[in-house]
Amino acid sequence: MRDLTADTMGTLEARGLLIGHNGSTLLDVPRLLLDGPGPTLILGPNGAGKSLLLRCLHGLIVPEAGRVLQDGHNLGPIQKARQAMVFQRPVLLRRTVTANLDFVLRRRRLNRPARRVRIEELLHEGGLAAKARQSARSLSGGEAQRLAILRALATEPEVLFLDEPTSALDPAATQAIEKMILRASSRGVRIVMVTHDIGQARRLAADVVMMQGGHVVEHGPADEVLQNPRSEAARRYLAGGLLI
Amino acid sequence: MQNFASEISAALLLILKGDAELWAIVLLSLRVSLLAVLISAMIGMPLGAALAVGRFRGRRAVIVLLNALMGLPPVVVGLLVYLMLSRSGPLGVLQLLYTPTAMIIAQVVLVTPIVAALTRQVVEMLAEEYSEQLRSLGVSCLASVPVLLWDARLALVTALLAGFGRAIAEVGAVIIVGGNINHVTRVMTTTIALETSKGNLALALALGAILIGIAVAVNALVSLLSLRAEQEGLSHA
Ligand SMILES: Nc1ncnc2c1ncn2[C@@H]1O[C@H](COP(=O)(O)OP(=O)(O)OP(=O)(O)O)[C@@H](O)[C@H]1O
Ligand SMILES: [Mg+2]
């Protein structure tokens, strides 16, 4: 067991990120530093570039300009291997729940007994023990999302990206996933998560990144950004969010 | 009509009493076509997967070619394989003409494009869905091939069954390269053609019934597999 008050690992920094498409700017982030403890929540309207930013930080998209640094190193294979991502729509292998987790553990070259122990722990953590032998594709939305998170955690990441992991889930499922995320965070995993749920941001975030039109319009401690947003864009977004 | 009825009962008798000649023919057919499908799978599935995930020059051309080869007329395949294997052909020294091996080669040529093209289709669809997730997990392009093949397994088995169906029912190619030699290269389809022309309808009918039975069984297996795929959420729709 890692220390529950472990420092958050994996400092992330983006410098001069630029992504365009047909002359329009999709993402323009001169500097973003994620080095504080606790989860970072990214908020912003549809099309703000939140998913794009996550993909960039995770090295799935190479930006036209700029770079991403993890612990001061350029994002290379070693750095990427220390990151994991849960996508907006979970992609599960067409195998059983257990096999989805085993896939990742095998890649980490754990031996059979070690894998079995770890799979049991993970299934327990995600409340999926009863579904171990079920085909992953037949899971409900919430269960599938939990499995996707477990599989990401199975890679033992230092940084975990989550793209709206609870956007289609009921309150109970949302709560289960938030607990998993907070547990991972308390173990020192850096959480970078996109959400549209301002309540969720309040519950989870240590710091909040506000995005609009491909720009980071505000980044700061959660209570500051959520209570007294400095930018007009953030104020409007939060006000709209409260009306819904 | 009387004649026809007696032929049918004679055919039934052949099947039921386990006629040695009949079953030798059936077994040879199965052996040739199963081996052909096995070899086609070993060539066609990696080829299809490579076309699905690889990005290289001439890829589109190969795909178009494969799709065209899927509809290759069996007699033409027979002719080409005959030319390759005939005594003066490039592979003539191997003396394979009029052997079961020649028939297997012809069927491999017929079935491989089917397996490769269907594999390409299925794996490409799956790769599109999996690509970001696999990259996120650090799986390289090459390493993703076995993952994709395994996860497409049900569709791939269906493709292999389709290939087997084509192989076992095919007559034009095997009759040219096999020669329909009694006890050597006589398979179900070629025997049916020969015996019918000779007027020996009982054997032809018996073999026809078995061939239909095999076709029905293959199709039942295909629909069973797709049903299972649906139940388990493994289908690609
Ligand atoms: N591959 C691409 N090609 C062209 N445009 C793209 C591409 N990917 C994203 N975009 C555009 O970039 C913008 C930002 O997309 P992104 O997915 O990051 O939005 P988002 O903030 O995650 O929105 P949502 O809340 O709806 O998920 C959108 O306008 C989108 O159309
Ligand atoms: Mg998004």
Image (cartoon, rainbow, N blue to C red):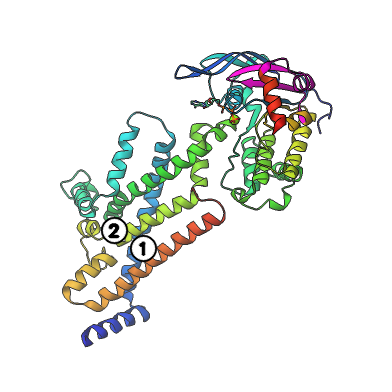
**How far across and down, in percent of the image, does residue A222 sit?**
77, 22
Provide the chain ID for the residue under circle 1: B
**How far across and down, in percent of the image, does residue A200 sit?**
74, 32
Q: Secondary structure at mark 1?
A: helix
Reply yes or no: does residue A217 show up in magenta: yes
Name the residue at 59% across, 24% down.
Answer: A48
Q: Which residue is mark 2?
A: B100
Name the residue at 76% across, 40% down.
Answer: A175
Q: In terms of depth relative to the viewer, which is nearer, A218 or B205? A: A218
Reply yes or no: does residue A83 show up in magenta: no
- Looking at marks 1 and 2 on the same chain, the residue that comes earlier in the sequence is marked by 1
Which image quadrant is residue B119 in?
A: top left
Amino acid bearing label 1:
Leu
Amino acid bearing label 2:
Pro
Q: In terms of depth relative to the viewer, which is nearer, A203 or A107? A: A203
Provide the chain ID for the residue under circle 2: B
Numbered label attached to residue B30: 1
Q: Is residue A120 above or below residue A238?
A: below
Relative placement, left or right, of A84 versus B228 is right
Relative placement, left or right, of B127 versus B18 is right
Which image quadrant is residue B135 in?
A: top right
Numbered label attached to residue B88: none
- Quadrant of the image containing the N terminus of chain B: bottom left
Mark 2 residue's CB less than 8 Å from ligand 1: no
Q: Is residue B217 above or below residue B205?
A: above
Residue furthest left as drawn: B88
Label 1–label 2 contact, CB within 8 A: no
